[in-house]
Image (cartoon, rainbow, N blue to C red):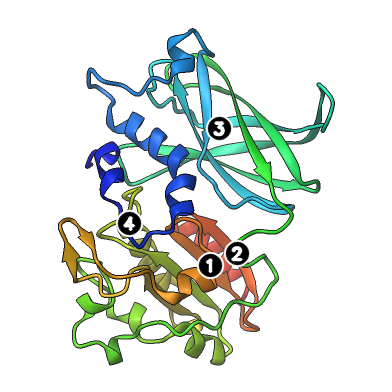
């Protein structure tokens, strides 16, 4: 896996600055993971000064009132990832103007394997009803038997930047194989599945069938999970078949045009139309064109298929 600390300096110029900013926690976690076994782990100033034994790092960037899928990793004081099977998560609302916090929800988080050197992250489903600052308390038994307690903070917004669950999916016009001289003009996937480029999003929505859309850039993905995420989409297609439509949207225009090690093109219009703060993103849309599921960062074919089957 390439060194993401170095990669950060060569992100495409067209990338929205807020994307780079919001990716910071993910980058820190991934770089720490890629440093495992090296002599140069990621250690924050707080850790150097004797901070907590473990810290949680929230990867999810788009969290709003209602249901949210929250992904987080845990690192030790040396900056190395700590893994387990499941964890207990308590979400506390930090009461404004008071040195107090209110328990809003207690849930279990499952460890999800990622196809990278990270190994995986924890995934928890939260349903929170008040905007503001929150703190997560995480408790679990690590794979080595150690008892782990970690904390992380996040801000809950009133509305998500991406389409909300139950809202209409934007009828974006996206590139298809029919218009492309070569698939490399519309996808950076090294071995693209032609079926994922047959329809534009607006065409698929007009058919009245459920739809799964993955926004990802396999060759230039910061988290190194975009290529695997598109492969998960193919797995869903092969399992569910023509009862639904399946689309991969490359986030860069003309991904074949490279300057140095990065694409020279701008972001495709659909990235802005869907309000994407990061990538990859996966959306499950029902036959009425309403968003019924959305997943930030890597998610398994099994999770996507389970949500898709609910729409059939």
Residue position marked by numbered label 4 in the rendering: 228
Residue position marked by numbered label 3 in the rendering: 86
Q: Quote the CA–CA distance across marks 2 and 1.
A: 6 Å
Residue at point 65% right, 83% down?
288
Classify the position of the C terminus by image quarter.
Answer: bottom right
Disc 3 on helix, strand or loop?
strand
Furthest toward the top, the residue is 50
Mark 3 vs 4: CB contact within 8 A = no
Mark 3 vs 2: CB contact within 8 A = no
Residue position marked by numbered label 2 in the rendering: 293
Dot placed on the residue nearer the N-terminal end, 1 or 4: 4
Dot placed on the residue nearer the N-terminal end, 3 or 4: 3
Q: Is residue 299 visible?
A: no
Q: Is residue 274 visible?
A: yes
Disc 4 on helix, strand or loop?
helix
Is residue 158 positioned above or below 128 on the image?
below
| Relative image position of residue 119 (x, y in whole percent) | 36, 37
Left of 247 or right of it: where is 150? Answer: right
Mark 2 vs 1: CB contact within 8 A = yes
Front one among 150 and 94: 94
Dot placed on the residue nearer the N-terminal end, 2 or 1: 1
Which disc is residue 283 wearing?
1
Q: Dot 1: few (<14), some (14–19), or many (≥20) neighbours within 10 Å?
A: many
Which label lies toward us, 3 or 2?
2
């Amino acid at each position: 896996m390439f060194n993401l600390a170095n990669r950060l300096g060569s992100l495409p110029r067209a990338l929205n600055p807020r994307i780079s900013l919001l990716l910071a926690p993910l980058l820190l976690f991934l770089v720490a993971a890629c440093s495992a076994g090296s002599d140069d782990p990621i250690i924050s100033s707080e850790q150097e000064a004797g901070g907590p034994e473990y810290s949680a790092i929230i990867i999810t960037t788009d969290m709003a009132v209602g249901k949210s899928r929250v992904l987080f990793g845990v690192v030790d004081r040396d900056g190395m990832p700590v893994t387990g099977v499941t964890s207990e998560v308590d979400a506390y609302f930090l009461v404004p103007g008071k040195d107090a916090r209110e328990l809003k929800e207690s849930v279990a988080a499952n460890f999800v394997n990622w196809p990278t050197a990270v190994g995986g992250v924890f995934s928890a489903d939260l349903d929170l009803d008040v905007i503001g600052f929150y703190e997560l308390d995480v408790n679990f038994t690590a794979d080595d038997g150690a008892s782990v307690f970690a904390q992380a903070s996040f801000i809950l917004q009133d509305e998500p930047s991406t389409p909300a669950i139950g809202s209409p999916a934007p009828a974006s016009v996206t590139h298809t194989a029919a218009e492309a001289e070569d698939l490399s003009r519309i996808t950076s996937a090294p071995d693209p599945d032609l079926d994922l480029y047959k329809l534009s999003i607006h065409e698929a929505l007009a058919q009245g069938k459920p739809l799964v859309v993955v926004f990802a850039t396999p060759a230039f993905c910061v988290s190194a999970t975009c290529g695997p995420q598109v492969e998960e989409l193919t797995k869903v297609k092969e399992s569910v078949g023509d009862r639904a439509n399946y689309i991969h949207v490359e986030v860069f225009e003309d991904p074949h045009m490279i300057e140095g090690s990065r694409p020279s093109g701008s972001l495709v219009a659909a990235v802005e139309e869907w309000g994407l703060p990061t990538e990859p993103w996966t959306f499950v849309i029902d036959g009425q064109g309403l968003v019924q599921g959305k997943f930030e960062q890597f998610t398994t074919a099994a999770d996507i298929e389970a949500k898709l089957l609910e729409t059939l």
